[in-house]
Amino acid sequence: MKIIRFNQGLEIARSLLAESELVRTKGAENFVLLRDLYGRLRLLCPPLTSQECEVMKNAWIEALGSSTDVDRPILIDSDFFNSTEVRANPLLQYLMLDDGPREISFVDRGVIGADWLQGAFPELASTEGNQHPKRIVFFGLKGGVGRTTALCLTARHFAKQGLKVLVLDMDLESPGLSSLLLPLTERPPLGIIDWFMEDGLGQASLDLLDKMVSFSPLASNWPGIIRVAPAFGREETGYIPKLSRVYADLARQGESKQQSFPERFFRMLRHLEEAEKPDVVLLDSRAGMHDIAATLLVRLPDALRLLFASHSPQTWEGYRCMFEHWRSFPRHLATFRDGLQLVDAMMPETGRQEHRETFSAAAYSLFNETLYEDIPPGSESGDIFNFQEADSDAPHSAPSIMWDRKFMEFDPNEANSSFHDEDLIRLCYSDFLSCIEERLQIEPRSEL
């Protein structure tokens, strides 16, 4: 049998389907490409004659070899107890067959990672007469790039301008934001993780929400306020056992329909926004490519998605991997790409001009070779997602955060902390904070 590696299989299948006269005759919309947990590819077909089925089967095995199930490479609806669950799968994606409009349905049965292929969650989008607060997601592929520090200083910035800021610590596997904005004595009795646990039992009430949000005393002398929903509360006794259950798809007690982690999270966020009525919501995302990051970065609608980056090969390769994944399944890309904003998170103390030039070139190359769309000759750009390299409003045009050793041991609760050094914050973060204000069109209400 011909050995076909995982990296090759999907492109081979796509090419085979694009060139298939049978697929063209029957209609690509009537086929579903399936990839199982082992990475093997099979094809769910509309009704075929025995001859058509044999032709497709032989072509499939010949092309895909070890990347298919040679015993049953071709499936029909009667092979399933209920084929509608496959054809109407909520995780259904669409694979472009060629440069034209043709596409084929694709179900990728991975253990995790499905949310990276989903679009923004419509129920949290703004509608006429129902505007949600401004939302900002803080994301980084790796830790150590100052993401959480930047979030704290963003909350400080807007609270000093008279805004009500709601902060959610969604880095559940590495919580730390809460301790920066809330001393332990000020922490609420419960946290976000308790909401997920109690929700499964049908006990996630409005009273519970009130017990998982507290005022940050750091904003007590400012015209605005900071409200924090920590990952866990001061009464926490079993965080790890709870964490092991957070990501499960669950049906709430008394209900039969299961809800995914994103659906449960979005319900919590909607309730929090309705109860707290903040002007701005800041969400600290888990680093890396876990599904919890996809929930915030990809599926949260109408959000500014800050992509923290250091100028290193690991950073550029990681983001390229993510962007190429999105480009391969572009149907939902338009629902979140406008909110993307790269951040130059660690501009060095010396050689800043050279750093800015090399970072900017790498950033433009990343976007231009992956997410930016080609503009056909002689046509207007219109709704085409494309920006010039020097366009300061482009998502690749990254605001810089100046690295300073005083932020290395960042503790806002210390009296002499850099959190209280207005001049230093203005020097290091003014470019970053101005970018946020411009992207979200946030107007201050007052300022000390």
Image (tube, helix red, strand yellow):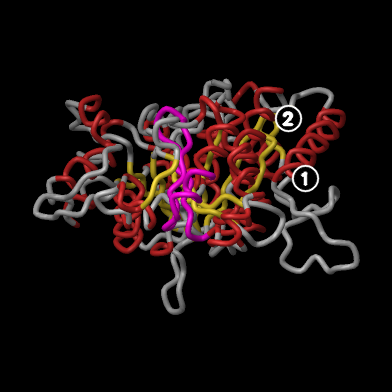
Residue 26, x across and y down, in percent: 53, 61
Residue at the left extreme of this rendering: 254
Apparent side of residue 255 relative to residue 394 in the rendered image (left or right): left
Is 257 contained in the magenta span? no
Can I make out residue 356 in this image? Answer: yes
Q: Tag 2's secondary structure?
A: strand
Q: Which residues are magenta?
A: 29-55
Name the residue type under label 1. Answer: Asn
Q: Quadrant of residue 173?
A: top left
Residue 405, x across and y down, in percent: 64, 21
Between the C-alphas of marks 1 and 2, the distance is: 22 Å
Q: Pick whichever, 161 or 265, lies toward us.
A: 265
The residue shown at (60%, 52%) is 330
Q: Earlier in the sequence, mark 1 or mark 2?
A: 2
Q: Quadrant of the N terminus?
A: top right
Q: Nearer the viewer, mark 1 or mark 2?
A: 1
Q: Quadrant of the C terminus?
A: bottom right
Q: Pick whichever, 400 or 184, lies toward us.
A: 400
Dot label at residue 263: none
Apparent side of residue 202 relative to residue 305 in the rendered image (left or right): left
Q: Pick whichever, 209 or 35, lies toward us.
A: 35
The residue shown at (52%, 40%) is 151
Name the residue type under label 2. Answer: Met
Tell me the residue that label 1 is attached to.
368
Residue at the bottom extreme of this rendering: 129
The residue shown at (15%, 54%) is 256
Q: Pointer 1: residues within 10 angstroms few (<14), some, or many (20+)?
A: some
Can I make out residue 159 in this image? Answer: no
Tell me the residue that label 2 is attached to.
347
- Residue 439, above or below 358: below
Residue 306, x across and y down, in percent: 59, 44
Q: Pointer 2: residues within 10 angstroms few (<14), some, or many (20+)?
A: many
